[in-house]
Amino acid sequence: MTTKLVVDCSTGVVEEVELTEEELAQREADAKAFEAAEKERKAEEALRAAKKAELLAKLGITEDDAKLLLS
Amino acid sequence: MPVTYKKIASVTVGAGGQAAITFSSIPSTYTDLKIVASVRNSSTTAGSFPTVFLKLNGSTTTFTGRYVEGNGTTASSATRTDSFLMSVNADSSTASTFSNLEIYIPNYNGSTNKSFSVDGVSENNATLSYAQLTAGLWSTTSAITSAELYFSANNFMQYSTATLYGISKS
C-alpha cells in the first residue's frame, strides 16, 4: 500500500491517504522517465570523462597539469 | 508590527515513509508561500540522488524550469519540462543526512502564471553532493490551493519534514 501525508491547512488535520490509481500510474511513468534520464546522464558523463582522458593522453599531461594551466 | 511571515502547517514523516507530502486547503490570506523541507529518499541505489517534484492543485502539467548546479566536480545547468525541484539524498548517502530545500512561490493567489524558485543542497560525506538553484514556472492562472512534494520512486524516509509558511505584504 502506497500512501501520502495530507495536511489540511484549514484544520491542521494530518491524514495518511492511499494513492489513487491515477497517481500510482503517474508515479510509475515518472519512475520510468527518471530511470531513462539517469541512464542518459550517466552515459553522457562517461563519454565526457573518456574524451577528457583521451585529450590528456594526447597532450601528455595529467589532470593536475591541466588545472594548473587553466588557473 | 504586523505578522508578515506565519507558519501555516508542518508535518514530519513517520516510520515506514510516505510517497508524498501534500498541503491542502491552503488559505488565500497571504501574498506569497514558502515551503521549507528536510528530506531523504529511501532509494538504496549507490550514487543515487532522486528528484523531488512539485504538484500544484494536483497538476503535474504545464511546468517548465531551468536549474544551475554544482555537484562536487562540475558546474552545469539544464532546462526542465517537468516540475523538477532538486536532487536529494537517498538512503545510499551518508547515514542520517538529509537534503534541505526552500521553495518560494510569489503571488500564489494571482491570476497570472505562477513562478517559483528553489534553493537547496544535499548532504553527503563524499565527493558527489549537490547544490542547486532552480527557477520554475507553472503556466496556469488558477490560484494555488494545494501543493505537494513527491518522488517518482521510493518514499520520503522517516523524519523528513516539510513546513508551509504564508508571507504577507507588510
Image (cartoon, coloured by chain):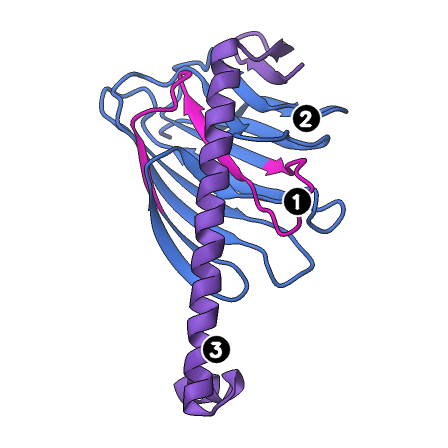
Chain colours: A purple, B blue
Q: Can residue B1 be seen in this view?
A: no
- Check if mark 3's residue and mark 2's residue have beta carbons within 8 Å: no
Question: In which quadrant is the C terminus of chain B drawn?
Answer: top left
- Which-is-in-front pick, marks 1 and 3? 3
Mark 2: few, some, or many residues within 10 Å (few <14, many ≥20)?
many
Helix, strand or loop at label 2? It is strand
B44 inside magenta stretch? yes
Q: In this view, does B165 lie above or below B58?
A: below
Question: Label 3 belongs to which residue?
Answer: A53
* Type of amino acid at the residue the image marks with label 2: Thr
C-alpha gap between disc 2 and disc 1: 24 Å
Residue sitting at x 31%, y 27%: B107
* Type of amino acid at the residue the image marks with label 3: Ala
Helix, strand or loop at label 1? It is loop
Q: Position of residue B156 (x, y in %)?
A: 64, 30
Q: Where is residue A8 in the image (x, y as percent from the top left)?
A: 55, 11
Q: In this view, does B94 lie above or below B80?
A: below
A30 relative position to B40: left or right:
left
Q: Where is residue B24 in the image (x, y as percent from the top left)?
A: 49, 13
State which region is magenta. B38-66
Disc 3 sits on a residue from what chain?
A: A
Q: Position of residue B42 (x, y in %)?
A: 68, 35
B163 relative position to B97: left or right:
left
Helix, strand or loop at label 3? It is helix
Q: Nearer the viewer, residue B112 or A70?
A: A70
Question: Label 2 belongs to which residue?
Answer: B12
Question: Label 1 belongs to which residue?
Answer: B45
B117 relative position to B51: left or right:
left
